[in-house]
Image (spheres, coloured by chain):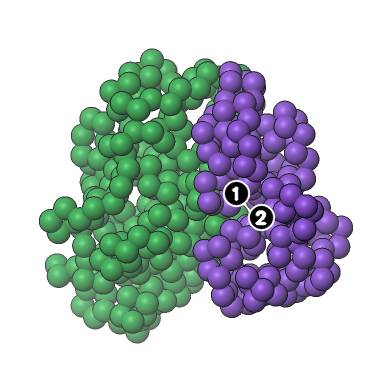
């Protein structure tokens, strides 16, 4: 690890100033600290966001659920409001990494990092969530821009995420057992206006699937998935799964998610 | 940089550079070498300690991030007279270790698990210890030990 200075501002304005001065934000650190060790990241200053009150908490705002960026995975997984109003998201958070990682990792860190196999981006995209930053509010569809890339400017921080509350939702992950990231993860959200399906782990970034959405909007049942063609083109290939296998997993995980959402 | 925190009930001040990991502070500055570094990539869990009531991987936490926190390591489990914690006793009685390298992290993770779920099923124990790897693959007796400690709790 290269040497760096460390700051832990309490005021959001001070955090923004530190980032504008070239500092690197650290949320839970469950990805960043490993990157520092490998010298993939070599910041001169780390700006810890853990003390900023505007990034903390979980609350219902009208018909949506707001979660502060520094909310840890174990908090989302165990929160009574999330479990009651958006159980699919609570279950997703409870399946990230392992217990020790969930005690440190945050939703804001996961969203800002946009790992192509991370769980949270699929929930944001399927639920049509809004990402709140220090500069603006962005729909998830504009925020996520593929492989570890987001719409965030270098001096912009995620402050929270708002999730519209669906009629039903669920996440099904086929996890890579060593990393516990998704080989394929599918988040299904049923709204009055239709069904949205977002897939992580299978491509270079999270994406929706028009065929699955159309079939499930017409008939929200696991059987509806049988008639959908899932093309392996553009899906990822690595030592864990071929594109064809990932395409098969998308169908299976979508069925499992729909079954859970209906339960 | 001076960092104050509480380790095993005692307030300590560590003078370390900002890039110091919690596990380095424990092992190299405070000589608490019961916490092990296995993979140094936050996968194996050998470095697990409890920070403010949550098990965390101390190789993946900066000392600075836990300034002011209460940390419990394997050295903090036994009573002052040397009487072992029920989880340590259960690991000994169930022979829940072979080489022993993962044991301190496994015990700390199990203590945290029982604190949050006092009567876990075998499946819940296996799921709860997912972040701790035993490369001797001695999991069967580890699960038995956690069950025994939970029953004695």
Name which residue lies at 43% across and 53% down.
A73
**Chain that appears purple:** B
Q: Is residue A5 left or right of residue A262?
A: right
Residue B33 appears in the figure: yes
Q: What chain does badge 2 belong to?
A: B
Q: Is residue A168 above or below residue B7?
A: below
Categorize mark 2 by other alpha carbons within 10 Å: few (<14), some (14-19), many (20+). many
User: On the image, numbered disc 2 is attached to which residue?
Assistant: B108
Outermost residue, right side: B99
Q: Position of residue B17 (x, y in %)?
A: 62, 20
Q: Is residue B91 left or right of residue A237?
A: right
Name which residue lies at 38% across and 56% down.
A76
* Label 1: which secondary element: strand
Quadrant containing the N terminus of chain A in the rendered view: top right
Mark linked to residue B50: 1
Name which residue lies at 41% across and 65% down.
A91
Name which residue lies at 44% across and 37% down.
A27
Q: Are marks 1 and 2 in contact (CB under 8 Å)?
A: yes
Outermost residue, top side: A21
């Amino acid at each position: 690890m290269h040497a760096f200075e460390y700051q832990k501002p309490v005021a959001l304005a001070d955090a923004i100033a530190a980032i504008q001065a070239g500092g690197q934000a650290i949320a839970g650190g469950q990805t960043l600290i490993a990157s520092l060790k490998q010298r993939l990241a070599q910041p001169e200053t780390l700006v810890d966001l853990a003390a900023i009150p505007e990034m903390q908490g979980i609350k219902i705002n009208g018909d949506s659920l707001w979660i502060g960026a520094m909310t840890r995975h174990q908090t989302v997984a165990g929160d009574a409001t999330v479990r009651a109003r958006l159980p699919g998201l609570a279950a997703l958070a409870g399946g990230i990494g392992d217990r020790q990682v969930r005690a440190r990792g945050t939703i804001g860190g996961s969203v800002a990092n946009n790992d192509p196999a991370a769980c949270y981006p699929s929930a944001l995209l399927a639920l049509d969530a809004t990402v709140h930053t220090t500069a603006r509010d962005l729909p998830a569809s504009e925020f996520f821009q593929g492989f570890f890339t987001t719409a965030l400017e270098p001096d912009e921080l995620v402050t929270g995420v708002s999730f519209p509350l669906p009629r039903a939702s669920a996440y099904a992950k086929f996890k890579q057992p060593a990393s516990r990231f998704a080989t394929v993860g599918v988040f299904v959200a049923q709204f009055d206006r239709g069904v949205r399906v977002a897939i992580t782990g299978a491509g270079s970034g999270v994406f929706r699937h028009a065929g699955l959405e159309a079939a499930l909007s017409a008939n929200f049942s696991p059987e509806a998935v049988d008639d959908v063609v899932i093309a392996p083109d553009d899906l990822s290939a690595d030592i864990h799964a071929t594109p064809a296998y990932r395409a098969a997993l998308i169908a299976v995980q979508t069925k499992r998610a729909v079954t859970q959402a209906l339960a | 940089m001076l960092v104050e925190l509480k380790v095993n009930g005692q307030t300590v001040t560590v003078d370390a550079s900002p890039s110091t990991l919690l596990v380095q502070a424990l092992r190299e500055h405070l000589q608490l070498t019961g916490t092990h570094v296995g993979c140094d990539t936050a996968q194996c869990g050998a470095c697990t300690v409890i920070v403010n009531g949550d098990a965390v991987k101390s190789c993946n936490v900066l000392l600075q991030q836990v300034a002011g926190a209460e940390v419990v390591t394997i050295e903090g489990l036994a009573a002052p007279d040397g009487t072992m914690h029920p989880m340590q006793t259960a690991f000994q009685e169930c022979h829940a270790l072979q080489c022993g390298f993962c044991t301190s992290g496994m015990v700390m993770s199990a203590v945290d698990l029982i604190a949050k779920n006092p009567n876990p099923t075998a499946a819940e124990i296996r799921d709860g210890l997912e972040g701790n790897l035993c490369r001797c693959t001695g999991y069967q007796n580890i699960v038995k030990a956690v069950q025994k400690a939970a029953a004695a709790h």
